[in-house]
């Protein structure tokens, strides 16, 4: 669904960014052009939906390198860290919705140049467009978009002119172990004028850690080394046919853990070893073909993805030295073929076919060691296997302009999905007799209705109904003897979400202000929830996923952006989101235990109020340069990890407030920027892991938490060639 909150085309319009030579100043809020409707490039203000967009200028203004740098500027959003190895896996939460089951896929889809699979912890470089679509996007984008969608579009080759830049970034953080470095660059090479061009881009990051191992006395054990690159080629084969090929490569190495011990007096862990190496090496190839048929446009977008990952972790929590070793091997092939109308007629349409086939192999083994150099450790539990998820779909959208002001859009998607699960559970290298071996599948049809009315070129109101869905799946660890879990919980079903929304989008005061607002109602059906068994098996109490009662939610969102309104050369943007939700029925999700959900309970980790403020001032430095100063602030309300009798316990997650500032100067070819991120050195909890207080039942004490990087001071220099 094209949801409605606001399309805050944050003013990438600041004149110092739009014209590095210190040229003409901007007096209106610049509209950001996006490709979110899969048809043509449009201003976000012309799309009837909740989209917050960032172009290259805005990404630079926010000093955005990581996912969390921009997502906090989007109303009604939050971000979590799933506690994965190294940097962890950053997970978006939109409108209070997040993945609430440990073995389910997320509720916010992510795409890179049309590919739905591209590794974890993606860092930005040479990105031309980032869009955050709030609300279910199932009609156009398919599975995993219950909460919304984040898409990244890399900067494309230009067949007309040469361009290049080089950037260096040196920074230090509180509690780190030394200087961090990041180097990036881009070169655009027109090989045949107006016909063929190649664009090369990449970055190298050597980032020191900020977590201290208090047992060994070593600082900065969670360091990161990353090399990422992109090779793009664009061929204007004819006046009507364009072919774009993009190759993404990534080589990431980190040291785990990326969490700290709550109550340790700082960002500390107590580990037997400083080493917990994590690697990620992936290759992603995209092929995009656009053909103008005169009466319509034919588009093919395909991708091939392969990732090999490996991580290790040492622990002695049980009194014995143990090594946990996990291997990951992912492969995916995705294809989408679309045909859409062209021209300015009252009737517009789009139809398409989508296919995604994703293999996820993982194997996790724990070993008991006599020492770190043990060459033949005793194997304990080994689990894992291959999960294949596939989806095939036909989709379409049709709109009709009844008048110059009134448009109605109808959309639909028929799809079938299948999860083929082949997992095993071994002890001591031997088959323990338990194998998860099953296939879950289904098909369904979703539809969307959207109406928009334009009072003028600058004011639009709209209302919509849309849907999203998520695959079902299997629980690996079930069985009365092993985990105290009945085999009736072997499989869990899909869940779906229906959203109703109304909004307004307006450009006011001679377009020096955009004001976008929306209100929505959500109906999340058969919510996938993680539950803990109250009956212990041979391996204690097990965790499993099942379907909970329906959840209903509602909320409001607001975005206001101004340029040269408060004062000349000053821009400011404010975003605010409020969301609430509650379960509609009591539920005893595990027979014979206490009630695990009560009617009126809220989804765990729901942040009720979020807001962010971004403000900047541009000014002349003599006659040959421009200077700028910027600040942004974001706030998240307190939340709770309680819910579903799950393994997060009942832990209060404190409110979060973070401030970032930067200042710099731009000449014809050179830019310098000094920045301070997390100015007040806050430690917001991005995720929390609970434990059992000594002698007490339950898991209601925060033991470990993930956080953002501490206060960071950096100096960044950029040189532009061919300006």
Image: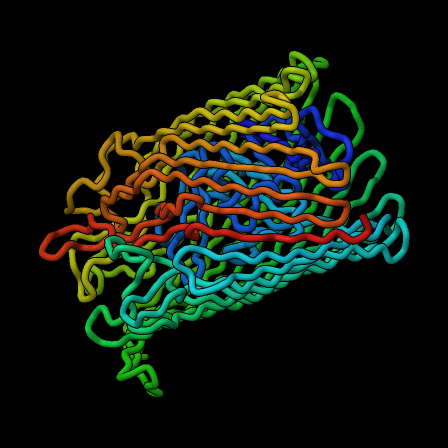
The extreme front residue here reads: 622
Q: Quadrant of residue 24?
A: top right
Q: Nearer the viewer, residue 111 or 152?
A: 152
Q: Quadrant of the N terminus?
A: top right
Q: Is residue 158 above or below residue 498?
A: below
Q: Is residue 561 above or below residue 93?
A: above
The extreme left residue here reads: 695
Q: Is residue 341 visible?
A: yes
The residue under the point 71% across, 28% down is 26
**Residue 548's spot in the image, x, y percent?**
31, 40
In the image: residue 79, left or right of residue 698: right
**Residue 645's spot in the image, x, y percent?**
23, 46
Total marks placed: 0
**Residue 721's spot in the image, x, y percent?**
78, 53
**Residue 323's spot in the image, x, y percent?**
33, 74
The residue under the point 56% across, 19% down is 504
In the image: residue 603, left or right of residue 249: left
The residue under the point 30% across, 72% down is 216
Q: Is residue 284 visible?
A: no
Q: Is residue 604 above or below residue 357?
A: above
- Snapshot colouring: rainbow
Q: Nearer the viewer, residue 323 or 631?
A: 631
The residue under the point 43% across, 65% down is 177
């Amino acid at each position: 669904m094209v949801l409605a909150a606001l399309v805050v085309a944050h003013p990438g319009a600041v004149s110092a960014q739009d014209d590095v030579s210190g040229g003409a100043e901007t007096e209106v809020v610049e509209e950001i052009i996006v490709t979110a409707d899969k048809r043509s490039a449009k201003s976000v203000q012309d799309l009837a939906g909740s989209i917050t967009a960032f172009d290259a200028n805005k990404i630079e203004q926010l000093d955005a390198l990581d996912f969390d740098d921009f997502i906090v500027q989007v109303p009604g959003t939050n971000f979590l860290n799933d506690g994965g190895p190294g940097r962890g896996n950053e997970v978006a939460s939109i409108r209070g919705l997040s993945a609430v089951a440990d073995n389910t896929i997320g509720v916010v889809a992510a795409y890179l140049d049309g590919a739905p699979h591209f590794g974890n912890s993606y860092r930005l470089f040479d990105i031309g467009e980032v869009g955050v679509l709030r609300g279910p996007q199932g009609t156009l984008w398919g599975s995993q978009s219950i909460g919304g969608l984040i898409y990244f579009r890399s900067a494309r080759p230009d067949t007309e002119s040469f361009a290049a830049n080089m950037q260096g970034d040196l920074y230090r953080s509180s509690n780190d172990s030394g200087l961090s470095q990041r180097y990036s660059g881009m070169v655009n090479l027109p090989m045949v004028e107006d016909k063929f061009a190649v664009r090369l881009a990449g970055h190298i990051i050597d980032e020191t850690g900020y977590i201290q191992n208090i047992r060994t006395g070593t600082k900065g054990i969670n360091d990161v080394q990353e090399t990422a690159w992109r090779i793009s080629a664009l061929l204007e084969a004819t006046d009507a046919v364009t072919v774009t090929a993009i190759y993404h490569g990534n080589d990431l190495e980190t040291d785990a853990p990326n969490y700290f011990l709550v109550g340790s007096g700082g960002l500390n862990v107590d580990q037997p070893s400083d080493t917990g190496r994590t690697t990620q090496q992936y290759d992603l190839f995209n092929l995009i073909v656009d053909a103008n048929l005169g009466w319509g446009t034919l588009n093919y977008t395909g991708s091939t993805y392969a990732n090999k990952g490996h991580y290790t972790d040492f622990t002695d929590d049980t009194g014995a030295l143990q090594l946990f070793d996990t291997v990951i091997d992912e492969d995916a092939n995705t294809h989408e073929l679309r045909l859409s109308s062209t021209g300015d007629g009252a009737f517009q349409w789009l139809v398409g076919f989508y296919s995604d086939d994703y293999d996820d192999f993982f194997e996790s083994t724990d070993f008991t060691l006599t020492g770190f150099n043990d060459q033949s450790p005793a194997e304990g539990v080994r689990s894992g296997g291959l999960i294949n998820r596939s989806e095939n779909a036909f989709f379409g959208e049709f709109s009709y302009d009844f008048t110059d002001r009134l448009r109605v859009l109808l959309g639909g998607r028929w799809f079938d999905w299948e999860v083929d699960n082949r997992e095993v559970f071994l002890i001591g290298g031997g088959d323990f007799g338990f194998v998860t071996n099953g296939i879950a599948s289904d098909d369904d049809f979703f539809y969307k209705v959207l109406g928009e009315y334009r009072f003028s070129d600058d004011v639009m109101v709209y209302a919509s109904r849309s849907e999203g869905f998520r695959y079902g799946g299997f629980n690996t660890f079930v069985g009365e003897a092993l985990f105290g879990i009945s085999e009736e919980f072997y499989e869990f079903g899909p869940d779906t979400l229906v959203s109703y929304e109304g909004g307004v989008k307006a450009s006011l005061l001679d377009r020096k202000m955009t004001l976008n607002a929306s209100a929505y109602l959500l109906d999340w059906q058969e919510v996938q929830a993680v539950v803990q068994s109250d009956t212990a098996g041979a391996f204690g109490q097990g965790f499993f996923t099942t379907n909970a009662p329906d959840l209903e939610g509602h909320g409001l969102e607001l975005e206001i952006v101004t340029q040269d309104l408060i004062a000349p050369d000053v821009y400011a943007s404010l975003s605010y989101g409020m969301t609430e939700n509650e379960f509609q029925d009591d539920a005893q999700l595990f027979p014979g235990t206490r009630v695990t959900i009560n009617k009126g309970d809220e989804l765990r980790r729901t942040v009720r109020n979020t807001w962010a403020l971004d403000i900047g001032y541009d000014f002349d430095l003599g006659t040959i340069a421009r200077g700028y100063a910027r600040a942004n602030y974001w706030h998240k309300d307190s939340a709770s990890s309680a819910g579903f009798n799950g393994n997060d316990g009942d832990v209060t997650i404190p409110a979060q407030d973070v401030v970032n500032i930067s200042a710099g100067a731009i000449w014809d070819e050179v830019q310098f920027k000094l920045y301070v991120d997390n100015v007040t050195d806050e430690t917001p909890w991005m995720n929390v892991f609970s434990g059992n207080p000594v002698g007490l039942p339950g898991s209601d004490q925060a033991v470990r938490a993930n956080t953002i990087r501490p206060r960071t001071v950096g100096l960044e220099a950029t040189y532009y060639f061919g300006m």
